[in-house]
Amino acid sequence: MLQLCQVTNALFISNSRSACSSELLRKEAVTLCVNVSRQQPFPSGDLTKLQVPVYDDPNEDLYSHFDRCADVIQAEAERGGRSVVYCKNGRSRSATVVIAYLMKHRGMTLTAAVQKVKTARHVVEPNPGFLSQLQRYEQELKTRRGTPSPDPGTGSAPH
């Protein structure tokens, strides 16, 4: 079944087949497509398109794309547009980018962002490497915001 899964008012996640459905994109008024793959096609039509060329491999660097993707999605929402983020199956790469967006622009924790995306699309499961990159990104965002993170070296053990 072709379906765009709604995460926020202006953000959807899906697999490649659904994201390339002109009918679905028109129905949901999608204006930006973020293709998180090296090989999946883009939909035809007059849409803004961003490609993040990564494979679904735990060793791939998706981290370096988090800020740019999150900022492009946010800018599209602020101008009244709607975005779909997709990869081949709509499970790992696209989910990772959507989670990073929620953490950066919605102020969510990693746990809350994963839960929100899983609620929208039940098959979501970022690979272990991407989850590790999201954990690193969560710490980076806390540092940027000036939120202290727990120091594992401070416990009740004597010094």
Image: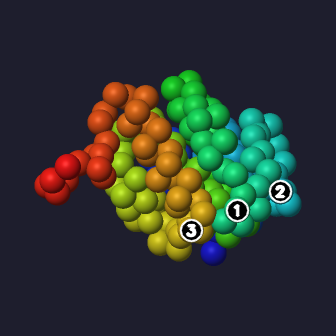
- Looking at the image, is 91 positioned above or below residue 130? below
Q: Which quadrant of the structure image shows residue 66?
A: top right
Q: Where is residue 62 in the image (x, y as percent from the top left)?
A: 66, 50
Helix, strand or loop at label 2? It is loop
**Residue in the picture at 31% in, 42% down:** 149
| Residue at image mark 3 | 128
In the picture shown, does residue 19 fall above or below 127? above
Q: What residue type is labelled 1?
A: Asn
Camera sees residue 81? no
Q: Do the residues labelled 1 and 2 touch (CB within 8 Å)?
A: no
Return the x and y of residue 1 as percentages of the image width and height: 63, 75
Crowd tier of the residue under label 3, counting other residues whose Cα lies within 10 Å: few below 14, some 14–19, many 20 or above: few
- Dot 3: element: helix
Which residue position holds label 2?
A: 38
Cβ atoms at labels 2 and 3 below 8 Å apart: no
Q: Distance between the residues labelled 1 and 3?
A: 9 Å
Q: What's the residue type where badge 2 is placed?
A: Arg
Mark sitting on residue 149: none
Element at badge 1?
loop
Of tags 1 and 2, the one toward the viewer is: 1
Find the distance from the CA under tag 1 to the CA under tag 2.
15 Å
Q: Mark 1 points at which residue?
A: 59
The spot of residue 156 in percent (x, y) is 14, 55
Considering only order in the chain, which callout, 3 or 1, is on the residue closer to the N terminus? 1
Closer to the N terminus: mark 2 or mark 3?
Answer: 2
* Left or right: where 61 falls relative to 82: right
Total count of labels = 3
